[in-house]
Image (tube, grey):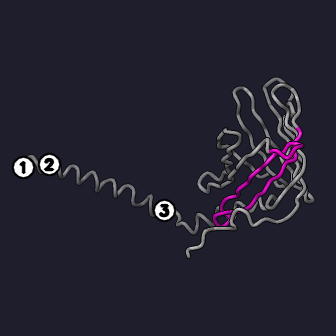
Amino acid sequence: MRPIRPFLSAAWLVFACVLTTAPARAQQPDTATLLTTQAEAMKAFSMIDGVWRGSATVMQPDGSRLNLIQTERIGPLLGGSVKVIEGRGYDEAGKVRFNALGIVSYNGSTKEYSLHSQAQGYVGDFLFRPTGDGYSWEIPIGAAILRYNAVVKDGELYEVGDRIVAGREPQRVFEMRLKRVGDSDWPAAGAVAPK
């Protein structure tokens, strides 16, 4: 009789787990609802879709300025539920000096947008907020914050980045002024066909 007891206890534990998680699973929205919610929320950033080109200035740690020709290609993926951004900064000789990839997504549970960013070997996840006429996001760096704000108006994307340290005046470390030069079917185009 003793060997049956542990077995019954284990069986009861599994049964209890199923009972306690079943209602939670039943309350989860289905995939179609999740994707629809995300795609609808991502419409807040539809104004940045396309191909962009212009100038960017980056303040270097040594105080010098790096002037770049900046390009961005931005488009929806996964049925519009995410936004993919690739930025490239070219020097005067046409060499890529900066390259970044960003994926903007929306979490229906938290009602927040996030930016997953990979640039120059750095990786991070940051809150990304629509502002009505653009977006804003921040990177915490020790005691400082890099705060980026962008406005999109009349075919122009103007973004600035300021280094914020408590008790000091903000320091402008980035400025980008791009013109929209066309539509893009990137990144959704070119998917591998089933045959």
Mark 1 — residue? 1
136 left or right of 11?
A: right
Instruction: For mark 1, give the secondary structure.
Output: loop
Residue 169 is situated, as x and y percent measured from the top left of the image, at 87, 27
Residue 73 highlighted magenta (yes or no): yes
Please report the residue visible at 33 percent of the width from the left and 53 percent of the height from the top: 17
State the CA–CA distance, disc 3 to disc 1. 40 Å
Q: Which of marks 2 and 3 is nearer the N terminus?
A: 2
Mark 2 — residue? 5
Helix, strand or loop: magenta stretch: strand
State the CA–CA distance, disc 2 to disc 3. 34 Å
The three-letter code of the residue at mark 3 reads Gln
In the image, 12 versus 67, the foreground residue is 67
19 left or right of 126?
A: left
User: In the rendered image, which quarter is residue 119 located in?
Assistant: top right
Question: From this viewpoint, which residue is outermost toward the left?
Answer: 1
Residue 159 is situated, as x and y percent measured from the top left of the image, at 85, 46
Identify whether 111 is placed above or below 29.
above
Sort mark 2 into few (<14), some (14-19) or many (20+) by Cα contacts within 10 Å: few
Identify whether 76 is placed above or below 1.
below
Residue 83 highlighted magenta (yes or no): yes
Badge 2 vs badge 1, beta-carbon distance below 8 Å: yes
Please report the residue visible at 65 percent of the width from the left and 55 percent of the height from the top: 106
Please report the residue visible at 21 percent of the width from the left and 49 percent of the height from the top: 9
Badge 3 vs badge 1, beta-carbon distance below 8 Å: no
Mark 3 — residue? 27
Identify whether 113 is placed above or below 183.
above
State the CA–CA distance, disc 2 to disc 1. 7 Å
Give the residues in magenta: 67-95
In the image, 39 versus 64, the foreground residue is 64
121 left or right of 68?
A: left
